Structures are given as structure tokens and as C-alpha cells.
Image: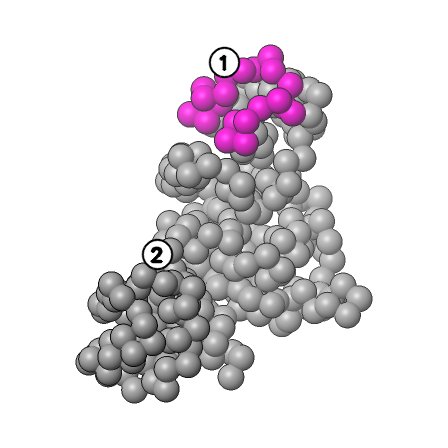
């Protein structure tokens, strides 16, 4: 398992992590969910022994991230957010190199990466720098797995990747989890939270909540509506000025709105919007998702 206790780190005047504590169970797919600048990368770099925390402690499978950093690196597969393989080396050369670094070979551990590598094997002689985003992602994951790690740490692995490749990637992670690998993954995409066993919602260096995705959603207590009209830009501003507005955020083609009063009667709101000149108004109750919960927790933290 992974255990972090009261981890803090600052860069000059920026507090990147503030007293972070959590634990991850062996064999769990655990997600750190939050926007850019939330502190996700700093946290994963501390856990992978790449940087030192200012205070606090952390361990990976009982190994201290400071004292036992060499042993942690032997059992960890790390995929940084930025593609960091050798651009001029071919797919096969990159894999062979990383296998050699860990004292193994591509042939010896081929079964471990077979399901992933088979998709890029037709391009094995192509320079890594000339691969598509999805193919680079698969190569980086293969390189992170080639030494049979006990834990896989992935920093925003699907950022900038197309929707089909994102879906395929998460299917691969599910299979790796089922094979017994503990997985830590960070992502800014709220919809990916629901693919994890448990998640930590993180913002401005602080953890807002840790639970299963359904556990987090079940804590959302406000009444929630999705609203649209013929003028979405004006709609957000007008609802923001409505006297019963607790929160209003843009979600795709709709606004998500919660009333302070908790009332489910929308007649007053609809009349208000009609008086503001809106037409084709749709107001209907909806179920919250992880992003609704994240925004609600953020609003609560900000007072």
C-alpha cells in the first residue's frame, strides 16, 4: 500500500501541497482528480522519490520515500505527464533500453505488455517522436511496465489524447489492476474519476474529499437542475443575479443550477428568465456527477 502523512511542499511563495494525508490499498486503482495547479504532479513526484517534501512522510509498500528511494524505484513504473522517452529511438529501441536499465529484456517480460504492445508493434521501427499521441501513450505505458512493477504511477496520462485513445487507455488500466498492479493516476478530467476504485479530489494543494466515486456523489445534498435557453451566455449572468441562486456552472450544453432554498418548484425561476427575454427555456432536475461535487466542495472551502 501507499501511505502519505502530513505532506507539504512549497516553491518560493507557492504552497503546492498543504498537509496532505491519505492511504492507498494494495491492488487499488486510485485517482487524484483536480485542475492544473492543484498539486497532483508534485505529490506523485514525491511518491516516486523524484523530489523531497518540505515536511511529512510517505511510504510505498513499507519503503520510506527518502531512506529507501532506490528500492522504491525498482518496484515502481512511472509515466510522467510529459512524453519523456527518447524521440530519436524507435519504439523497439526505447522498450529494449528501459528493459536493460532494470536488468531484464523485452522478450522476458513480453507477456506483461503484450496486450498493449501488440497495438504499436506494427510501428516498432518508427522513431518515438513520430508516433501519434495515442501511440506515444501506449509506448510510455509499455516502458513503465517492462520491469514488472508492483505499483504504476501515471501523471495525467490522457491529457491531450483523443476520446477513443482515452477510452482504450482506461480499459488497459482496468486489466492491469485485475492483474494485481496497484495504480495511482492523476487527471484533470472529472469523468475519469468514475473509472477509479477511489478518488481524492484535490485543489490548491489540499484534499477536499477521499471516497469512492459513488460515495462522493452520495454526499451531494443540494437540489440540482440543468437549464438552457436560446442565449446561454446571457443565461449564466441572469441566473447568477437570481435571488435564490446558490451556485450556477456551465456543463456542456446546459447550466447546472442549485437554489439556496432547496425548492423543486421552478415556476418563479422560469418567470424570471422569461422577463429577462429568454426563450426556449428548459429547466429539469438532474443527478449530480463528480464535477458537481467538486465545484460544491470548492465553493464550501471558499466560504
Residue drawn at x 55%, y 27% as measured from the top left:
132
**Kind of element beneath mark 2:** loop
Front position in the image: 56 or 154: 154
In this view, 244 is above or below 39 = below
- Residue 131 among magenta residues: yes
Front position in the image: 262 or 24: 262
> How does the figure colour the protein chain or chains?
one colour
Query: Cα distance, mark 1 to mark 2?
Result: 40 Å
- Mark 2 Cα shell of 10 Å, populated few (<14), some (14-19), many (≥20): few
Which residue in the structure is indicated by mark 2?
A: 253
Residue drawn at x 59%, y 40% as measured from the top left:
79
Q: Is mark 1 in CB contact (under 8 Å) with mark 2? A: no
- Examine the rendering and report whether any part of residue 131 can be seen: yes
In this view, 170 is above or below 103 = below
> How far across and down, in percent of the image, does residue 87 sit?
69, 25
Query: Image quarter for residue 160?
Result: top right
Magenta stretch: give its range. Answer: 115-135
Question: Can you tell which of label 1 and label 2 is closer to the viewer?
Answer: 2
Residue drawn at x 58%, y 53% as measured from the top left:
60
Mark sitting on residue 144: none
- Mark 1 Cα shell of 10 Å, populated few (<14), some (14-19), many (≥20): few
> How far across and down, in percent of the image, does residue 16 sit?
67, 65
**Kind of element beneath mark 1:** helix
Looking at marks 1 and 2 on the same chain, the residue that comes earlier in the sequence is marked by: 1
Which residue in the structure is indicated by mark 1?
A: 122
Front position in the image: 156 or 36: 36
> How far across and down, in percent of the image, does residue 162 sit?
46, 37
Q: How many marks?
A: 2
Query: Image quarter for residue 294?
Result: bottom left
Residue extending furthest toward the right: 12
Amino acid at each position: 500500500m501507499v501511505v502519505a502523512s502530513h505532506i507539504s511542499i512549497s516553491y518560493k511563495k507557492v504552497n503546492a501541497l498543504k498537509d496532505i494525508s491519505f492511504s492507498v490499498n494494495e491492488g487499488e486503482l486510485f485517482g487524484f482528480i483536480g485542475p492544473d495547479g492543484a498539486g497532483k504532479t508534485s505529490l506523485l513526484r514525491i511518491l516516486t522519490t523524484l523530489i523531497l517534501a518540505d515536511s511529512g512522510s510517505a511510504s510505498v509498500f513499507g519503503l520510506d520515500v527518502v531512506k529507501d528511494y532506490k528500492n522504491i524505484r525498482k518496484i515502481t513504473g512511472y509515466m510522467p505527464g510529459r512524453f519523456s522517452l527518447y524521440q530519436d529511438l524507435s519504439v523497439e529501441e526505447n522498450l529494449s533500453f528501459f528493459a536493460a536499465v532494470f536488468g531484464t529484456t523485452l522478450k522476458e517480460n513480453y507477456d506483461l505488455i503484450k496486450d498493449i504492445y501488440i497495438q504499436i508493434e506494427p510501428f516498432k521501427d518508427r522513431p518515438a517522436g513520430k508516433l501519434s499521441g495515442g501511440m506515444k501513450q501506449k509506448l510510455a505505458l509499455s516502458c513503465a511496465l517492462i520491469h514488472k512493477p508492483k505499483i504504476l504511477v501515471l501523471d495525467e496520462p490522457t491529457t491531450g489524447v483523443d476520446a477513443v485513445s482515452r477510452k482504450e487507455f482506461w480499459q488497459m488500466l482496468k486489466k492491469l489492476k485485475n492483474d494485481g498492479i496497484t495504480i495511482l493516476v492523476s487527471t484533470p478530467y472529472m469523468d475519469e474519476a468514475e473509472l477509479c476504485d477511489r478518488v481524492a479530489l484535490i485543489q490548491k494543494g489540499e484534499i477536499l474529499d477521499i471516497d469512492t466515486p459513488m460515495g462522493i456523489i452520495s454526499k451531494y445534498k443540494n437540489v440540482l437542475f440543468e437549464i438552457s435557453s436560446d442565449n446561454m451566455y446571457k443565461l449564466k449572468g441572469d441566473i447568477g443575479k437570481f435571488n435564490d441562486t446558490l451556485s450556477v456552472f456551465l456543463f456542456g450544453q446546459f447550466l447546472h443550477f442549485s437554489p439556496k432554498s432547496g425548492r423543486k418548484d421552478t415556476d418563479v425561476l422560469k418567470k424570471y428568465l422569461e422577463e429577462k427575454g429568454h426563450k426556449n427555456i428548459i429547466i429539469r432536475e438532474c443527478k449530480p456527477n463528480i464535477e458537481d461535487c467538486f465545484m460544491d466542495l470548492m465553493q464550501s472551502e471558499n466560504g
